[in-house]
Image: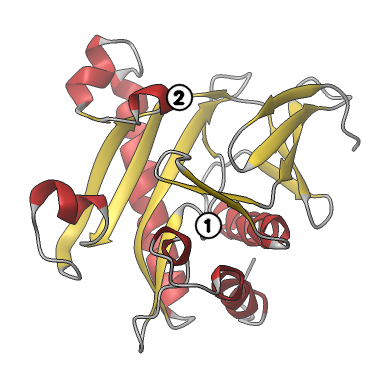
Amino acid sequence: MEKRDFVYEGKAKKVWTTSDPNLYVVEYKNSLTAFNALKKDTVEGKGRLNNLISASLFRYLSGMGVPTHFVELLDDLHQVVKKVAIVPIEVVVRNITTGTLCKRLGVEEGKTLPRPLVELYLKDDELGDPIITEDHALLFGWSTQEQLLRIKEITLKVNSLLSEYFLRLGIILVDFKLEFGIDSSGNLLLADEISPDTCRFWDRDTRNRLDKDRFRKDLGDVLGAYQEIWKRISSSGEKQ
């Protein structure tokens, strides 16, 4: 599967057409951004790790019955995915309080929630991806009621599966962001990526941060954290 026409470049990935009109090639970049791209850097090797991690997690979820856009891994930087129309809503699941949740609501950091908190954000960089309600999504046509119900169903299943998966690796899945898309047959699919760029991972024993928070908070050794996630995934023996 070869890249053909360039389609789109985001903060972390590039997208290309292929000989199949229903398939794209995604290229993972070494760029790092935070705070809606106000903070930027490049870390050599980061694209490879995110590509491998995301591919592995998509394979795992697909094997557990979650519909995803992932098709196959091409090489260290590229994977093939199904072409989808992205639903303009980012879904954030929070299991432990941290980040903007604490800043926005003044709640204590590190509190384990009695059940997952699901939040919706409008996917719009110019507006800073504002938090929205289900009514916003429905009234402004960003999603249908059926899509929202299915999105929440898949989201909670992904949270359950990945929380258990990572706990077996000695990692706490603190929170994460998901995106969804509609394929040519009208199916709702989990899309984008699942990586240390889009998830918060804490070591179960030390609470050491193994994700992009190391970049956000200037903690250093960003690549080492991503490498640790891939090391545990690739050596776990879990079904992938």
Question: What residue do we see at 35% from left, 40% from top?
Answer: 91
Q: Is residue 73 left or right of residue 150?
A: right
In this rendering, the answer to whether 80 lies above or below 202 is: above
Question: Which image quadrant for residue 150?
Answer: top left
* Colour setup of the view: secondary structure
Q: Residues within 10 Å of mark 2 (few under 14, many from 20)?
A: some
Rendered image: mark on residue 64:
1
Question: Which image quadrant for residue 10?
Answer: top right
| Quadrant holding the C terminus | bottom right
Question: Which image quadrant for residue 138?
Answer: top left
Question: What residue do we see at 26% from left, 61% from top?
Answer: 95
**Amino acid bearing label 2:** Val
**Amino acid bearing label 1:** Met
Q: Are marks 1 and 2 in contact (CB under 8 Å)?
A: no
Question: What residue do we see at 43% from left, 66% from top?
Answer: 218
Q: Can you name the residue that lies furthest to the bottom here?
A: 205
Q: Foreground: 142 or 10? A: 10
Assign a secondary structure to mark 1.
loop
In this rendering, the answer to whether 45 lies above or below 119 is: below
Report, in whole angstroms, how far the alpha carbon at label 1 lies from the one at label 2: 23 Å
| Quadrant holding the N terminus | top right
Residue hosting label 2: 87
For marks 1 and 2 on the same chain, the one whose residue lies earlier in the sequence: 1
**Horizontal and vertical percent for residue 197?**
51, 54
**Horizontal and vertical percent for residue 202?**
38, 74
